[in-house]
Image (cartoon, rainbow, N blue to C red):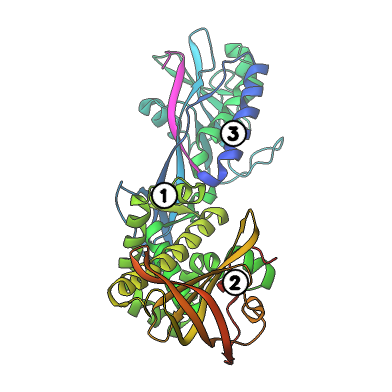
Amino acid sequence: MRADRHNTTVLVPAVELATFRKRLDRLNAKAAKFGLDPVLASEPVFRAYKIEHEENASGTGAHYFTVPLRQGESPKAGQGLVRMAEIAIEYPIVRLGDWRVIAKIEAMGAPKGAAADPGPTSNLVFAVSSDPAEVAVAEAHRCEAIGCEHCGKQRRRIASFILTDGASFKEVGQTCLEDFTGIDPARALFLANLHEFVSFEEYEGRWTPNCIGTREYVTNVLFAVERFGFVSASKARDTGETSTFVEARDLGHRLKKEAELSCAYESTRERHAQTADAVRTWYAMNASPTGFDANVRALLARDELLFDPKHLAFVAGAVAQYQTSRLKREQDAADALNLRHVGEVGLKTTMRLRIEKIIPFETIHGYQWRINCRDESGNRLSWRTSVPPTEAMLASVPHGWFEAQFKVKDHGEYNGIAQTDVTHLKVISWVPVHEPVAEDAIEGPRP
């Protein structure tokens, strides 16, 4: 830091960073107008802070303060968190000759351009020095009548400035400032704005939670999915339902109001929290290069998540994807142990089957379809055809099991699971069921 500049560190709520930068730009425009060097700000370092509070001794209120969340520390469930940007700044010292301004004293409640209110003395102190001794001198004027040691005139004053030459201090009235030091009062008033700028951490939004612990949020998502089912952000827009990410974000408020829901949450929280750890570990080890997975890895690696709809929706979708993948892995593991081939290669057989999935694909000879089925024991069969049964392609037609005759083409495997490839399949008859085929049973376009 240069000898003619102060330095300090400010805390800015992450959601107010754009406002901070606008204020910095406006402040530096004034600095240039007054011939001062600009205020310099470092790149922000983001860090989560816990919002703590202490009850007053009288029990009539509470004092709120923030405490940095240590790296690797998991916040408590329901803990208010705010992500702050730590920014180091340097700002100019306004001086002329040996004198420089270290603080502005302002009568509390005095409107701009009006005389100070009579009564008990109580002033606002805007110290622009970071030196403890100089700040202490400025603070000593908080409960003293505002005066001027330059002209000594006794009158009701709106403001004064505290000056130092390094050895002594002097309080000078606003109108006498330029006469005593040559410093234009407008340049000194710049310091008041500068104080507001370097005290940005006092912004009231500091106490408004703007993030949530990642483990807690994923736990909330798992509870919401189990309780209400998964609703994506896009489906919520189309149907008017509440999306899962909103349910999980606002769950803490509902738990305070709904006793039954709170009991259900408490009884399952530890189980969901353990699954939340598994979700984060699984994505950390998932080297998939897709943009979605890369974004999810970055978000889940943090100890906290901002209340950013895009971030929260990404994570909620990732949790649903993990659940689907986990169920498939468990099913595949069970299938690998229990499923068998059916029939004898080269021979015809007849049995009851049910369509599991229809996959269209294009060849040089036109569209073909792979129709995956299961028998009554769950064994997998696969049929490739260019002429699928009409009923199989109509998801709106109630059908399920059907009697089929086919020839066994091969006993193979797919992803380590026994699969029987068939050919010359003929539908003998459909066995209607009450529910229609699921929409996701047919992949890709339908010609």
Q: Is residue 152 above or below residue 360?
A: above
> On the image, numbered disc 3 is attached to which residue?
21
Of labels 3 and 2, earlier in sequence is: 3
Q: Is residue 273 magenta?
A: no
Q: Position of residue 5 (x, y in %)?
A: 46, 18
Q: Is residue 320 above or below residue 140?
A: below
Give the spatial CA distance, label 1 vs label 3: 29 Å
Instruction: Give the farthest residue toward the front.
Output: 346
Q: What is the three-letter code of the residue carrying label 2?
A: Thr
Magenta range: 1-13
Of labels 1 and 3, earlier in sequence is: 3
> On the image, numbered disc 1 is attached to which residue?
297
Of labels 2 and 1, earlier in sequence is: 2
> On the image, numbered disc 2 is attached to which residue?
242
Please, what secondary structure does the residue beneath circle 2 have? Answer: loop
Q: Nearer the viewer, residue 433 or 116?
A: 433
Please, what secondary structure does the residue beneath circle 1 have? Answer: helix
Q: What is the three-letter code of the residue carrying label 1?
A: Arg
